[in-house]
């Protein structure tokens, strides 16, 4: 007879609780794993483009936002992008109209992405309603390609 136990997806939290009791220093990995199962927001839309083996580009559509309404920062291994709508007293002529259909959303938001330990932000740019974040993989010197001949 075998003593094999069958686990279901609903058993994962209990299983990881048992594992984490003996996994010193791995708390961050378990926290990241359980963050993945949380509901994901869909606004604003974005693309994640693989530029090369060591570089990726995050493109976020922020139509209607001004540069001073957007904040991009990293903290505790996460990339945060925040958009805060600033209400102006002097409305533009387009905002004085009654909309029949308003398909372009402009609302405050916060989006978060978990970053791997070997990923850093190389460049951030906002142009024509598109926020571009260039992400680079940190390659240790002993892993980098070296040509000898």
Image (cartoon, helix red, strand yellow):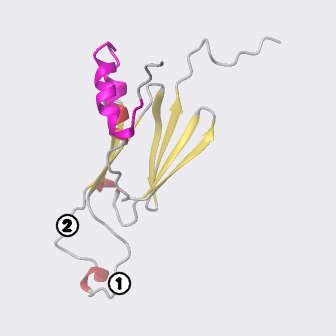
The part of the image, by quadrant, that contains residue 7 is top left
- For label 1, the residue is 101
Q: From the image, give the main secondary structure of the stretch colored magenta.
A: helix
Q: Which of 126 and 52 is in front in this view?
A: 52
The part of the image, by quadrant, that contains residue 106 is bottom left
In this picture, is 93 found above or below 85?
A: below
In this picture, is 148 found above or below 98?
A: above
Answer whether residue 88 is visible to the viewer in this image.
yes
Residue at x 30% of width, y 85% of height: 99
Percent position of residue 80, x then y: 33, 42
Residue at x 44% of width, y 23% of height: 4
- For label 2, the residue is 87
Range shown magenta? 6-31
The stretch drawn in magenta includes residue 115: no
Percent position of residue 98, x then y: 26, 87
N-terminal label among 2 and 1: 2
In this picture, is 148 found above or below 32?
A: above
Percent position of residue 51, x then y: 61, 42
Percent position of residue 27, x then y: 31, 22
Q: In this view, does 49 lie to the left or right of 42?
A: right
Residue at x 37% of width, y 33% of height: 33
Q: In this view, does 2 lie to the left or right of 139?
A: left
Answer whether residue 74 is visible to the viewer in this image.
no
Packing grade of label 1 (10 A; few <14, some 14-19, many >=20) is few
């Amino acid at each position: 007879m075998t003593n094999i136990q069958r686990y279901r997806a609903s058993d994962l939290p209990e299983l990881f609780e048992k594992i984490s009791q003996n996994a010193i220093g791995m708390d961050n990995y378990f926290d990241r794993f359980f963050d993945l199962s949380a509901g994901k927001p869909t606004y604003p839309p974005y693309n994640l483009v693989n530029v090369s083996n060591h570089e990726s580009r995050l493109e976020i559509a922020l139509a209607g936002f001004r540069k001073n309404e957007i904040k991009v920062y990293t903290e505790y291994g996460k990339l945060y992008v925040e958009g805060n709508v600033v209400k102006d007293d002097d409305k533009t002529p387009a905002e004085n109209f009654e909309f029949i259909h308003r398909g372009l959303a402009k609302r405050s938001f916060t989006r978060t992405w978990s970053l791997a330990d070997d990923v850093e932000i190389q460049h951030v740019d906002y142009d024509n309603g598109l926020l571009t974040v260039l992400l680079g993989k940190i390659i240790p010197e002993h892993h980098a390609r070296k040509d000898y001949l």
